Amino acid sequence: MRRIVAFVLLCSSSIYTYADTLLADPTKPSRLVAYAKSSNIEQPTYKVSWLRTGNKNNMAVVNGQRVQVGDSVDGATVLSIARSGVTLDVGNKKQLISLAEHKGFSKVKSGK
C-alpha cells in the first residue's frame, strides 16, 4: 500500500511539473516580445542651454547639468566646448550640439 501511495504521489508531482513547462501563463508577455522591446531603446537627446568660452575653463550647461571638458552627461563624454557648441562622444561617435539648434535664442542689440 505504501508503494502505491508513494507511486501516486511521485507521478502526480511530476505531472504538475510537466504541466507547468507546457502551459504558459497567458498574462505574461513572451520572451520574444520582451526582447524586442528592450532592443528599441532610444538614445537621449542633448540640449545646450548655456556656453561660456574664453582662454581657459570653458563651461556649458547640457541637459541642465553644468559640464567641462572630460565630464559625463547622460552617458556622453564632453570632448570640447567652443563658441560653435559642445562636442560630445556619444557611443564612440562625435556629436556637435550648438545653441543655434534650439529655437528661442536670439541676439538682441540695445540702442538709443
Image (spheres, rainbow, N blue to C red):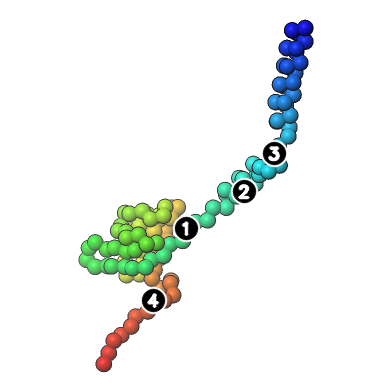
Residue identified by numbered label 2: 36
Residue identified by numbered label 3: 25
Residue 44: give its label.
Answer: 1
| The N terminus: image quadrant | top right
Instruction: Judge left or right: residue 10 versus residue 45.
Output: right
Instruction: State if disc 1 and disc 3 touch (CB < 8 Å).
Output: no
Q: Residues within 10 Å of mark 3 (few under 14, many from 20)?
A: few
Residue type at mark 4 is: Phe
Residue located 69% across and 39% down the image: 25
Instruction: Judge left or right: residue 108 versus residue 34.
Output: left
SS assignment at label 3:
loop
Q: Vertically, is 14 above or below 78?
A: above
SS assignment at label 2:
helix
Q: Residues within 10 Å of mark 2 (few under 14, many from 20)?
A: few
Q: Position of residue 82 (x, y in %)?
A: 31, 66
SS assignment at label 4:
loop
